[in-house]
Each structure stands twice: as C-alpha cells, then as structure tokens.
Amino acid sequence: MEENTGKFLWIDLTVPEAENIRDFYSAVVGWEWEPVAVGDYSDYNIKTPSGELVAGICHRQGVNAKLPPAWINYVIVHSVSESVKACIDNGGKIVDGPRTQNEDIFVIIQDPAGAYIGLYGKE
C-alpha cells in the first residue's frame, strides 16, 4: 500500500434512507447496485453499467450513525495514527474512528474548512 500513499482509494455515501438514494442514483446516473450484508440489513456496492465497482451507499445507522450525509472520499496514508495527529495539530477534527477493516485502519476527519475525508492505511 506504501506506493499508493496519497491516492484516492474509495468513495462512500452514508445516508438515513440508503435504498431511496441508491434508486435515485440508479435513475440519474445509470448506476447498478448489489447488496452487501451488514448484520441484519444491507448496504450497497455501486457499479457502472459495465460492472466496474465505483462506490458504496451505506445506511446511516449502527457504526455509521455519526457520519455526515456526504460523499466521503478515502485517501491512502502512510500511517493513520500520524495523520490523525497532524489533523488535530492543524485544526482538523476526528468525526469517526479509527476503525479497523481487515488488517487496515480508517478514520473520517473534518478539515478546518468543514469538508470531510477518510484516511485509510496501517496503524
């Protein structure tokens, strides 16, 4: 993952009524979707009509309850803990996390202008 530091990895939208928004984007953009089981409900992987996986649309509940209803880009960082410290030292805020995903860690931050971004990487 080191060689990908600084690159965008993924984008998610987390909203209260994921099905409605999933259907909205299917109609407006032409995206297709497939369910991803999350406990007793499903979030959605979003694909282009040719089948390329491009994003996720998630329910704003459970572990995602604190996330804003905004498209959040995730960028790969060398060290999540170092990036979190730099975020706070430079006037940013931690919105959610850190959380683990497989062997990696991610966190959602808010920059001093109020914009959100996800940081994804090791430790």
Image (tube, rainbow, N blue to C red):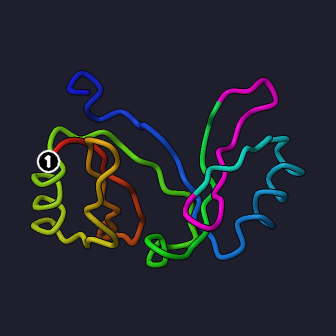
Residue visible at 42% across and 65% down in the picture: 115
Reading the image, the residue beneath label 1 is 123
Is residue 41 magenta-colored?
Answer: yes
Quarter of the figure with residue 60: bottom right
User: Would you place residue 46 above or below residue 94 in this image?
Assistant: above
Is residue 70 magenta-colored?
Answer: no
Residue 104, position as x, y percentages in the image: 27, 43
Residue visible at 30% across and 51% down in the picture: 119
Q: Nearer the viewer, residue 70 or 90?
A: 70
Q: Is residue 109 left or right of residue 62?
A: left
Q: Crowding at label 1, few (<14), some or many (≥20) Cα neighbours within 10 Å?
A: some
* Residue furthest out toward the right: 27
User: Would you place residue 34 above or below residue 2 in this image?
Assistant: below
Give the total of numbered labels.
Answer: 1
Question: Secondary structure under badge 1?
Answer: loop
User: Would you place residue 44 above or below residue 67 in this image?
Assistant: above
Residue 84, position as x, y percentages in the image: 17, 60
Amino acid carrying label 1: it is: Glu
| Magenta-drawn segment | 38-52
Q: Is residue 23 left or right of residue 108?
A: right
Q: Quadrant of the N terminus?
A: top left
Q: Is residue 62 left or right of residue 94?
A: right
Q: Nearer the viewer, residue 120 or 39?
A: 39
Residue 85, position as x, y percentages in the image: 10, 61
Residue visible at 65% across and 59% down in the picture: 42
Q: Nearer the viewer, residue 115 or 58?
A: 58
Residue visible at 47% across and 70% down in the picture: 64
